[in-house]
Amino acid sequence: PAFAAPRGYAGDVRYASDFLVDGRVAPKAHAVRSLYVLSSEPPLRMGQERWSELGCTPHSSHGSPADMGAVVSHHAPPDIAFTPQDENEICHWRRRAHANSGDGELTLEGAIAHLAPRRRGHAGAAPSVAAPPAVAADDQSMRVRYTAGANREGRRRAQLRVRRRWILAVRRGLARFGRPWTDLPGDRSDYDILVDLPAAP
């Protein structure tokens, strides 16, 4: 969510003084700045060089949860199992809506604009109507239009539900690991803790 901060510290969540009450999502520049400054704090102490070494970008926060969910898989216990639909859902999170776009539908991302139907009389032009971001044509369906937006609850709650499942899976994997997460190797083998997770005790 968008937050207020003193002059000179815009986008730095360490200096957040309050949430903005209008429900806005933080702009990308603020989210990126906060991610970098938080990762520079203990215990990570990640500078730009470390980000480059790991091949991480701010966009990784969209991709990594889905990647981890695929490792957990639908074979895991029901409370933490991840289906392909869950992997797709967790990729989206809440994207910013244009203030004047009706009920708050989200604009189509450039990366998948080619999936949208063309408007008559505008050959080669992307549609000007708002559409939710997606990775498949299915996410331009009425199901998404009727569950996403400022006055809708279905999509937001579905995303929160799948994120809770992701957090539970990671927590269970760390519990089985039996040591602080800072003892993990710090590479792709970290995902090993998510394989063949046990049922809740």
Image (tube, rainbow, N blue to C red):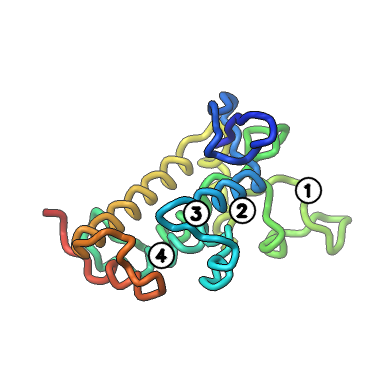
Secondary structure type for disc 2: loop
Q: Residues within 10 Å of mark 4 (few under 14, many from 20)?
A: few
Label 2, label 1: how far apart the Cα atoms are: 14 Å
Whether residue 71 is visible to the viewer of this picture, yes or no, is yes
Horizontal and vertical percent for residue 149? Answer: 57, 38
Q: Which residue is mark 1?
A: 128
Tell me if 126 is positioned left or right of 139 in this view.
right
Identity of the residue drawn at 41% across and 44% down: 160
Which of the image's four quarters has the N terminus? top right
Which disc is residue 84 wearing? Answer: 4
Q: Which residue is mark 3?
A: 39
Residue closest to the eye, 201 or 6: 6
Label 3, label 2: how far apart the Cα atoms are: 27 Å
Identity of the residue drawn at 31% across and 60% down: 181
Which amino acid, by three-letter code, is at mark 2? Pro
Label 2, label 4: how far apart the Cα atoms are: 17 Å
Secondary structure type for disc 4: helix
Looking at marks 3 and 2 on the same chain, the residue that comes earlier in the sequence is marked by: 3
**Pointers 2 and 1 in contact (C-beta within 8 Å):** no
